[in-house]
Image (tube, rainbow, N blue to C red):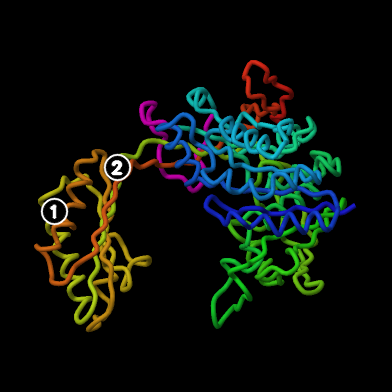
Amino acid sequence: MTFLLGSGAGFSGDRTDAAIPVVAELIRRGQPAALIFETLGERTLAAAHRAMRDDPAAGFEPLLEELLAPVLDECLTHGIAILGNFGAANPEGACRVVAELASTTGRGNASIGRVQGDDIRARLGELDLQRWEAESRELPGEEALISANVYLGAAPLVEALALGAEVVVSGRVADPALFLAPLVHHFGWAWDDWDRLAAGMMAGHLGECGAQVTGGYFADPGCKEVPDLARVGYPIIEVEEDGSLVVTKPAGTGGMVTERTVKEQLLYEVHDPANYLTPDVVVDLSFVRVEELGPDRVAVTGIRGKPAPQRLKTTVCYEGGWQGEAEISYAGPNALARAQLAAEVLRERLTFRAPPELRSRLDIVGHASVFDSDAGDLQRGLPARTNGDYRLRLAAEHAERRWVERATQELLALYCAGPAGGGGVRRQFQRRVCTASYLVKRSDVEAFATLFDANPSNQRRVADVSR
């Protein structure tokens, strides 16, 4: 029987009403199904660790309650499993929120599974670490280390489902593993059935970014039109036991599922289509076929798999000093020239008002920003216009907050000590968390599942699924 995978979120900060039509469609179809919330990236994991450092009760997805409240009761009623990496740095805290939310709907006995083992900070110094191929930074010293989390595969998620968990909460797992797990649990796929595992992983890859495969992020007016983007439907992936799959979306929602939207997502973040590395399988897309079956129905076939890699990616977060931003606007006649003058004044001021270790960048938003260098070469070379609306942005970083504050204060001073007509200054400062990527041996990672109990002494370790 077909198994349905519904996407409820594709990143932290995604639309909190997205899962409602997805769940309604899963219920209408009446087939075995799971709802997946993918809310974790390296940036959001770092932010979660920073939040937990400030408040031990924080550190999980901040929108967790808003994401689950509209659909939790319906999913529990209709046997739709929920899996999410919304535990981030604090899966325990996320489990408590889920338990409390379930109680408010009369589901105080809801079974919640918790995946553990991704946090290896305490063991980092004793492990055989290998630098990820794109990583240039050295590991930080013990005093700067905040966290170290391994990208786990689907096995501990499968164990949680096998224990009877109706909601599975994890921290750092590979995003598509959230989708693969209910397929392995439902169909009983073997852990060396590489082609089926690869198909399940790519079902997850197609659904992990939410609306990105149904027209969101795809839209480009005049080139790639997408209907009713304000009500874009999030994806539903139909998967058969043999691994064949179809991408679709809830009826009556906006957006679209076409050959082009699916191909874009299929290749998203894939550095080598013949060897896409995931914790559970190496995926080979060399023979993939993408075919439109009808409106908003696209089949993906020909996915192949190879044995899983022996090392798992690990994200290390560490203290990165302070960063700050400040902005000021210039508009009207000759606005660009005034913004450029303001930038030059700031550059000169920072040469003798800040230490050489201060790193800074000036962008003129509306003229040259995203594609410019830190030195501002592009904004100097582009032709000037006589008027417009521009925003001068200063970004600065240093190990000490006082120097970041002083740098941004220099922009504030442009109100009266700079060109005419500046206004709307905004300043902010925050501690910076940096990340680095390394690889650890699979054999050194011990991941397992437990059923959550509000009383920690009642929680029991159930299985070792390090694979």
Where's residue 182, x and y in %? Answer: 77, 43
Q: Which numbered disc covers residue 351?
A: 1
Q: Amino acid at mark 1?
A: Thr
Where's residue 318, x and y in %? Answer: 40, 36
362 within the magenta span = no
Q: Compared with residue 67, is residue 262 higher up or lower down, i.e. above or below?
A: below
Dominant secondary structure (helix, strand or loop) of the stretch shown in magenta: loop
Q: Compared with residue 301, is residue 138 higher up or lower down, i.e. above or below?
A: above
Residue at horizontal 80%, vertical 57%? 238
Looking at the image, residue 388 sits to the left or right of residue 275; the answer is left
The residue carrying mark 2 is: 322
Where's residue 232, x and y in %? Answer: 63, 67
Q: Compared with residue 269, is residue 127 higher up or lower down, i.e. above or below?
A: above
Q: Amino acid at mark 2?
A: Trp
Quarter-of-image position of residue 386:
bottom left
Where's residue 258, x and y in %? Answer: 71, 72
Foreground: disc 1 or disc 2: 2
Whole-number angstrom distance, CA of label 1 to CA of label 2: 19 Å
Q: Residues within 10 Å of mark 2 (few under 14, many from 20)?
A: many
Looking at the image, residue 403 sits to the left or right of residue 277; the answer is left
Q: Nearer the viewer, residue 210 or 155?
A: 210
Magenta part of the protein: which range?
Answer: 128-146
Q: Secondary structure at mark 2?
A: strand
